Amino acid sequence: MAVLGLFLAWRIKHKNEDAMWLWGMSVVCELWFGFSWLLDQLPKLCPVNRATDLAVLKDKFETPTPSNPNGRSDLPGLDIFVSTADPEKEPPLVTANTILSILAADYPVEKLSCYVSDDGGALLTFEAMAEAASFANMWVPFCRKHDIEPRNPDSYFNLKRDPYKNKVRPDFVKDRRRVKREYDEFKVRINGLPDSIRRRSDAYHAREEIKAMKRQREAALDDAIEPVKIPKATWMADGTHWPGTWIQSSAEHSRGDHAWNNSGNAKAS
């Protein structure tokens, strides 16, 4: 601050007689920038450190009142958005673990929602999120029951420290083994989705080709039959075309043309 003051004093005392207007503008700008810098430095001289007091929050938002006799949480609802674009560059398992860690956060479950925005419109992402929503029904209650940290399943099950330390509930070991087994199966399903979607799409495509050839034979009778060419679509499990991006891009089903949101709330028992 002393250096800044000396510099500004020197600038004011040493005028440029040949360009007074330019000198005046530069001095005004330097004074303004110096004042702005000073305002920016003042909070850093006396920083304020804040800490969350859970007891105070509980008294404020979860204490029974005449308007809230059951003591239900008055905390505001939270909507969390997770964006993804390419399941090849952003593995679905990583996205799924992110979603699970959000849903398992220490917040009233009825007030927490997570939305996934896939700019690529990939069926792989959609089915991976459906698997994650299903696994959340087990993972979220487990986290809340045993105060699990971290709440990302992959990070938790790869911890180097003893997972049983400071766990006093007698059923923790049984619950952890059950959830670990289910998570291993969950990973296998997620990692197997690309091949599963491809095989399903190939099977439906072959069926559609056979139907098209049969219709062509019935219509052509004795005329020459040309090879049937139909777009190779990406098929959903219910036997319908995926409305987003197909594995083999075609008109109205190419990457970047679709965006959709998938939301899910995890319910803890």
Image (cartoon, rainbow, N blue to C red):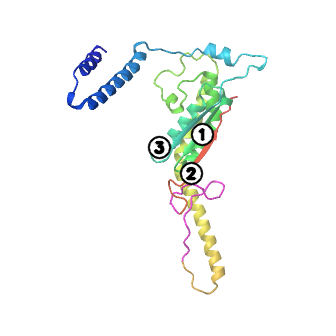
Magenta stretch holds residue 98: no
Q: Earlier in the sequence, mark 2 or mark 1?
A: 1
Who's the residue at 61% across and 66% down the image?
207
According to the picture, the residue beneath numbered tag 1 turns out to be 115
Task: Please state the horizontal and vertical placement of residue 47, each as a whole percent of the image.
Answer: 44, 14
**In the figure, residue 14 lies in which quadrant?**
top left
Q: Residues within 10 Å of mark 2 (few under 14, many from 20)?
A: many
**In the figure, residue 132 lies in which quadrant?**
top right
Who's the residue at 62% across and 37% down the image?
135
Report the magenta residues as a range.
Answer: 227-250
Mark 1: secondary structure: strand
Tell me the amino acid under the disc marked 1: Tyr
Tell me the amino acid under the disc marked 3: Glu
Distance CA(mark 2)–CA(mark 1): 16 Å
Tell me the amino acid under the disc marked 2: Leu
According to the picture, the residue beneath numbered tag 2 turns out to be 123
Q: Earlier in the sequence, mark 1 or mark 3?
A: 3
Magenta segment's dominant SS is loop
Q: Residues within 10 Å of mark 3 (few under 14, many from 20)?
A: few
Whether residue 172 appears in this view of the structure is yes
Q: Give the left or right position of residue 58, taking residue 49 as reference.
A: right
Q: Earlier in the sequence, mark 3 or mark 2?
A: 3
Task: Please state the horizontal and vertical placement of residue 76, each as a whole percent of the image.
Answer: 65, 27
When the figure is inspected, residue 232 is found, relative to residue 118, above or below; the finding is: below
- Which quadrant is home to the C terminus? top right
According to the picture, the residue beneath numbered tag 3 turns out to be 90
